[in-house]
Image: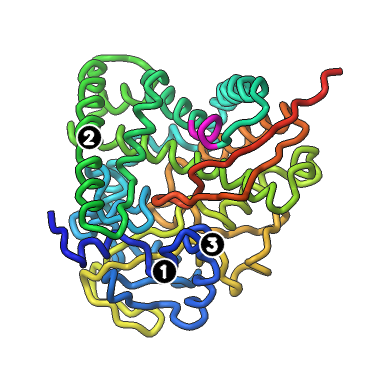
Amino acid sequence: MSTDDSAVEMRQPPEAIRSREGQLDPFEWYAKMRQEAPVHFDEQRQTWDVFRYDDAKRVLNDHDAFTADRGQAAVDSATSTEDDGGTILETMIGVDPPEHERLRGFVNERFQPGSIRDYRSRIAELTDELTAQIEGDGQFDFVDEFAVPLPVIVIAELLGIPSERREQFKDWSDSLIARPDNTSASVERVQRQREQARKEMGEYFAELLEDRRTGDGDDLITLAATTEELSTEERIGFCMLLLLAGNITTTNLLTNAVWCFEEQGLMDAIRTGEIDRKNAIEEVLRYRSPVQSVRRIAAEDVELNGHHIQSGAIVTVWLGSANRDPEVFDAPESFRPERKPNRHVSFGSGVHYCLGAPLARLEADVALEGLFDRFDRIEVDRTDLRPLRSLYGLRSLPCEATPKTQS
C-alpha cells in the first residue's frame, strides 16, 4: 500500500480537530464552518465537507447523486468517521438501490421495533448480571465493565455465536475501525492489523455459515446461511457488519449518555423519572452522536449550496455538525433532554438509515434503567477523558457507584 504523505493524510481527521481536545470537542469548529464555509473542499484530505443540516439531508437522501457504492467510494460509512480503509466486505451499507433492498430486505423485519421488543427481557437480564458485578466492586470503568460487554453479548446472541468470545470480538472490532497516527509506520501497522482481523473474522463466519446451511434455528447466522438472496461473500459480509456495527455504536451511545447526564447534573432527575429517559437518550444521540461523519461519493456532477462538485469527488457529511445547526435546533449547544421534536440525523437518513437503530435505542433504554435501579449514586471522574480514534466516544470512564439501600 502507499505510504506517502497524502495516503497518511487521507486517514486523519481535519487538522482543526486533530488534537485530543479537538477530538473531544469538535463542536466549536463545526459552528465556525457552518457559518463561514458550510460546504468546503479540504485540499489535504481531498474531500468536500458538508456541515449544515439541510445540505447533509440532501446528500444522505439523494442516493442517485451521492452514492454509497463502495465500488466508487473507498469508505465504509456505517462504522467510520474519517477512515477510508474499507473495513468489511460488500454489504448493504456499500451499495444503493436496487441491490441495497436485496441485501437488506431479508433481515429488515427482524430489526423493526415490534420485533426488537422481544429482546427487552434478555437485555434486562444481562444488565442485571453486569450491574451485580459492578456493585461488588464499587469503583469501575464504565466502558470496559458495562458499555463494552453488554452490546457484544446482545449481538452475539442474536447472531447465534458464543458470548465467551467477546474479547475476541472486541479485538476484531477495534482493529477494523482503528485509525492510525500521522505517520507512515502507523498506517502500515493499522492496515496489517485490519487485514488480519478481517481475515480471521471472515474465516470464523464462513465456518459457522457452512455449519448452519441446513439448519432451522432462529439466529441471524442461520437466517443468512439459509437465504437464497445472498452469495457466500455477502453472507460473510452481513455477519461481519452486524457484529461490528451492532456493538461499537451502542457502546459509545451508553458511554456518551452517562458522560452527558453526569456533566449536566441530570443523573437524579433521569433516575427518578422527572426527566423522560427515552427523550434524554435522543438528546444524547443529537448532542454527542457516536458517529460524527459519514462519506458519500458524487455519482454525477452536482451543485450543492452554490458549489460545483464533480463526479467522483468524495463528500464527507458531518452529522455532528448537522445535529447542532441553529436553523433546525433551538439552542443547539445546550443539552435539553426535553427537546421535541428532535430531528437529529445520528442514524443517518434515506435508504441507508441505520438498520440497528431500534436495537440501539432499546439497549440504551433498558441498560440505563437497570443501572439506575441498581445504584442510588453514580459519580463520574471526568478529569482525564481520552477520546477514541475511531467513533466519537471515550476510551474509559472511571466511575464510583453507591448501591441502593436495601429496605
Q: Which residue is mark 3?
A: 25
Task: Identify the colour scheme used.
Answer: rainbow
- Is 145 magenta? The answer is yes
Residue 368: image location, x then y, percent: 65, 35
The residue nearer to you, when weighing 191 against 208, is 191
Which residues, given as a range, are shown in magenta? 143-148
Q: Which residue is mark 1?
A: 58
The residue nearer to you, when weighing 369 against 11, is 11
- Report, in whole angstroms, how far the alpha carbon at label 2 lies from the one at label 1: 30 Å
Residue 150: image location, x then y, percent: 52, 29
Mark nearer the viewer, 2 or 3: 3
Q: Quadrant of the C terminus?
A: top right
Q: Which residue is mark 2?
A: 230
Can residue 227 be seen here? The reply is yes
The residue at the point 20 percent across, 40 percent down is 195
Considering the numbered disc 1 on the image, is that residue within a helix, a strand or a loop?
helix
